[in-house]
Amino acid sequence: MSAAPLTTVAAHRQSCLDLVRPLPPLDLALRDALGCVLAEDVVSPRPLPAFDNSAMDGYAVRVRDVESASEDEPVGLPVVGDVAAGRADSLRLVGGTTVRIMTGAPVPHGTEAVVPVEWTDRGVSHVTVRRAPVPGQHIRRAGEDVEAGVLVLEAGTRLEPRHLGVLAALGRARVRVRPRPRVVVVSTGTEVVEPGLALARGQLHDANGYLLTAAVEDLGALAFRVGVVADDARELAAVLDDQLVRADVVITSGGVSEGAYDTVKEVLSAPGAHAVRFDRVAVQPGMPQGLGTLGEQAVPVFTLPGNPVSSFVSFEVFVRPALRRMLGEEGPDPQRPRVRARAGAGWTSPPAKEQYVRAAWTRDGDGGFVVEPVSGHGSHLVTALARATCLVVVPAGVAQVEPGDEVECVLLGPLPVEPGPDVPVGRA
């Protein structure tokens, strides 16, 4: 009996995206909203600043009273008051006098400029001014930053520290956002042990659990790593059932191929509350893939291959876009940026599959990208991941990449400089 035809990468990715939806919005305190996506437009409820205030420690003056001041011929004025930041009462500046004022303090009515203390002798009851300001100098006007009723942040914005600062400045203690999905990561395999433990013959450390947990956290979701689960159907079923109470998504690695001890496939293929299908996807590395829902809550699950490189590529190509959709990222296909580059070396590719090659990019003399693989194709060659800065995508139907060929690359991190004019940037 012939094997079922391979599912295309695009079709499986779309199935992953169709499985999830953005989480319902909720109101969070600002301290808890970092990394979340805004679910509302934020409009300034008042001008910012709310009142005219001093940009410097100095003296509030009328310009005509000090317009002749210079180092050679300073001007003296009586100091008739002090205005500290936070003072609520209203003062009026009388011509021929000055008021000492602090940074951020409301300027008295009639103030035309602020003379910085550095331009004076710092007098307390009488001050000598050695330099003349121009009208409006060192005064922050009400609404200079933003007027009341102006859109400040749009729905769909991923909240970074700078955005939280703006929200706090507007007086917002809480904000409506899409919450970060809670992602449970489960590594499987009797041969897998925790890092830090000595290895017996035939064992290996759990790279996948830490790699996937970090990848989840890196894109802004909340990750919960479960300890390694042995190849025991009862144990795995119990762990999955226990984790559903805190999971918006479950990711497993290992146990999805055609072997006798592929426990994930065994447990999730059994009749019951789970609805999971397993596909053979035309991708290298990472052909065996699974997706579906767990339990009566229909929690989405993605089952990834056990080899570390296969697990990493599967996460990048299939799971990362789905999690970004759950976070509320805009766009029909939220993925990493891609660039066009020139192959600096040649390699082979299986023509029946879409290949993702770990590679590193550099710039050529014209500012274009040049990429070269950082290791062989083996999905167990995990150390090359540390040197990879991109994944080169070789389409199905291509058997050979020659030096100098133009290729498409998924960037695994930000570009340190802007690409040259001949290097188009898109979305993966």
Image (cartoon, rainbow, N blue to C red):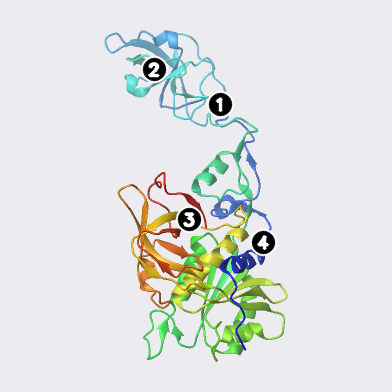
The residue lying furthest to the left in this view is 72
> Which residue, given by chain and number where applicable, does mark 4 sit on?
21
Instruction: Report the residue at 57% width, 24% height from top.
Output: 89
Comparing labels 1 and 4, the label whose residue is closer to the camera: 4
Amino acid marked by disc 1: Ala
Mark 1 or 4, nearer chain start: 4
Q: Is residue 418 left or right of residue 14?
A: left
- Identify the amino acid type marked 4: Arg
Instruction: Pick whichever, 298 or 364, lies toward us.
Output: 364
- The answer to the question of whether label 3 and label 2 lie on touching residues, with beta carbons closer than 8 A, is no
Closer to the chain start, of discs 1 and 3, is 1
The residue identified by callout 3 is 338
Residue 125 is labelled as 2
Q: Secondary structure at mark 3?
A: strand
* Residue linked to disc 1: 142
Mark closer to the chain start, 1 or 2? 2
| Disc 2 secondary structure class | loop
User: Label 1: few (<14), some or many (≥20) within 10 Å?
Assistant: some
- Comparing 276 with 131, the one in front is 276
Q: Look at discs 3 and 2 and give the one toward the viewer.
A: 3
What amino acid is at disc 3? Answer: Arg
Give the alpha-carbon distance from disc 1 to disc 4, as whole Å: 42 Å
User: Tag 1's secondary structure?
Assistant: loop
- Residue 259: image location, x then y, percent: 54, 89
The disc, 2 or 4, on the residue closer to the chain's N-terminal end is: 4
Most foreground residue, 212 or 407: 407
